Image (cartoon, rainbow, N blue to C red):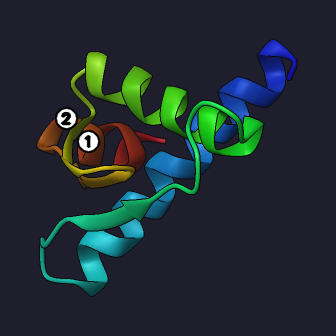
Amino acid sequence: MTVEQKKALREEKLQALYDHNEKAGGRPAGIKYTDLYENEEDKQEHLAYEYLHDKGLIDYKILGRNTYHAKITSRGIDRIEEG
């Protein structure tokens, strides 16, 4: 995956969490992976969420094996709304 593709994936995931936040009344989104070690798509998605979490744009926490919750933060909302 190129750097540009990684950036686009992060923006896509942040926008999706913004949209989910509006539709779900602020409840977190459930994220399920099939295999974070063997599935490249799962791995890249997880890395995108980890990056957004490290930047303070989302909360991202593990619930169980291959299951996470993700929720956009106020900082993430501001980022989307500021364009």
Q: Residues within 10 Å of mark 1 (few under 14, many from 20)?
A: few
Q: Position of residue 49 (x, y in %)?
A: 43, 35
Amino acid type assigned to the residue bearing label 2 in the image: Arg
Amino acid type assigned to the residue bearing label 1 in the image: Asp
Q: Is residue 60 left or right of residue 42?
A: left
Is disc 2 placed on a helix, strand or loop? helix
Q: Residues within 10 Å of mark 2 (few under 14, many from 20)?
A: few
Is disc 1 placed on a helix, strand or loop? helix
Mark 1 touching mark 2, by CB under 8 A? Answer: yes
Hey, which residue is sitting farthest right in the picture?
2
Q: Position of residue 57 (x, y in %)?
A: 27, 33
Establish if 56 lies above or below 32. Answer: above
Calculate the distance from the C-alpha at mark 1 to the C-alpha at mark 2.
5 Å
Q: Is residue 71 left or right of residue 65?
A: left
Q: Residue 27 appears in which quarter of the rendering?
A: bottom left
Between 47 and 37, the one lying in front of the other is: 37
Q: Residue at x 13, y 82 (%)?
A: 25
Between 61 and 72, the one lying in front of the other is: 61
For the question of whether residue 55 can be seen, the reply is no
Q: Residue at x 75, y 35 (%)?
A: 40
Q: Residue 11 appears in which quarter of the rendering?
A: top right
Between 74 and 54, the one lying in front of the other is: 54
Q: Residue at x 28, y 16 (%)?
A: 54
Q: Residue at x 79, y 14 (%)?
A: 3
Establish if 1 lies above or below 35. Answer: above
What residue is shown with label 2? 75
What residue is shown with label 1? 78
Q: Position of residue 1 (x, y in %)?
A: 86, 23
For the question of whether residue 78 can be seen, the reply is yes
Q: Position of residue 36 (x, y in %)?
A: 55, 37
Which label number is shown at residue 46?
none
